[in-house]
Image (cartoon, rainbow, N blue to C red):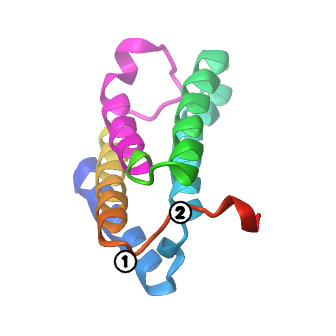
Amino acid sequence: MSPIVFGLILGIAITFAARITEFDADSSYHATLLVVIATYYVLFAYMSGEAIIEEILFASGFSAIALLGTYRWLPLIGIGLILHGIFDLVHPHLLSNPGVPAWWPFFCLGVDVVLGTSVIFLSHTGRVNLRDQSND
């Protein structure tokens, strides 16, 4: 099975599990997915001992998108996930990080596109709302 197909299947499984458990009703769930997905490159950089600072900076950018989307505009999290999928494809041209498995970019692209599309869809259907800052 190709990495992108496996990523698409995993993305669908994650989306389905989130729907069944109703985790997807909370915007912080989607934000957490984006933050965790973005930090995998930091792990790969740590494993290889290269590009750690650069990977932390990119992960921080995606984390900022997740935070902003959680409190201001939920589709931004979905856009952030899809942008991360694009980042997966251009990553080898931006940074040298030998810790990244060869199959990772296409696998992660598949997951990111499904999850991002799901968040955008859920935000437009009203199934999930922005996090209420007054209850924190």
Please name which of the two marks, 1 or 2, marks the residue nearer to the observer: 2
Category of crowding for the residue at label 2, using alpha-carbon neighbours closer than 10 angstroms: few (below 14), some (14–19), many (at least 20): many
The relative height of residue 39 versus residue 53 in the rendered view (above or below) is: below
Category of crowding for the residue at label 1, using alpha-carbon neighbours closer than 10 angstroms: few (below 14), some (14–19), many (at least 20): some
Foreground residue among 28 and 103: 28
Q: Is residue 78 covered in magenta?
A: yes
Image location (x, y in percent) of residue 18: 46, 75
Residue drawn at point x = 55 percent, y = 33 percent: 41
Q: On the rendered image, what quadrant is the N terminus found in?
A: bottom left
Q: Residue furthest bottom?
A: 20
Figure quadrant of residue 105: top left
Answer with left or right where residue 64 lies relative to residue 80: right
Foreground residue among 122 and 73: 73
Q: Residue furthest right?
A: 136
Q: Is residue 76 covered in magenta?
A: no
Q: Earlier in the sequence, mark 1 or mark 2?
A: 1
Foreground residue among 8 and 30: 30
Q: Main secondary structure of the magenta part?
A: helix
Residue drawn at point x = 51 percent, y = 84 percent: 21
- Count of picture labels: 2
Q: Residue furthest front?
A: 134
| Three-letter residue code for mark 2 | Ser
> In this picture, which residue range is highlighted in magenta?
77-103
Which residue corresponds to mark 1? 16
| Three-letter residue code for mark 1 | Phe
Residue drawn at point x = 65 percent, y = 20 percent: 52
Answer with left or right where residue 56 lies relative to residue 81: right
The answer to whether marks 1 and 2 mark residues whose Cβ atoms lie closer than 8 Å is no
Image location (x, y in percent) of residue 46: 68, 28
Figure quadrant of residue 81: top left
Query: In terms of secondary structure, where does tag 2 sit?
Result: helix
Which residue corresponds to mark 2? 27
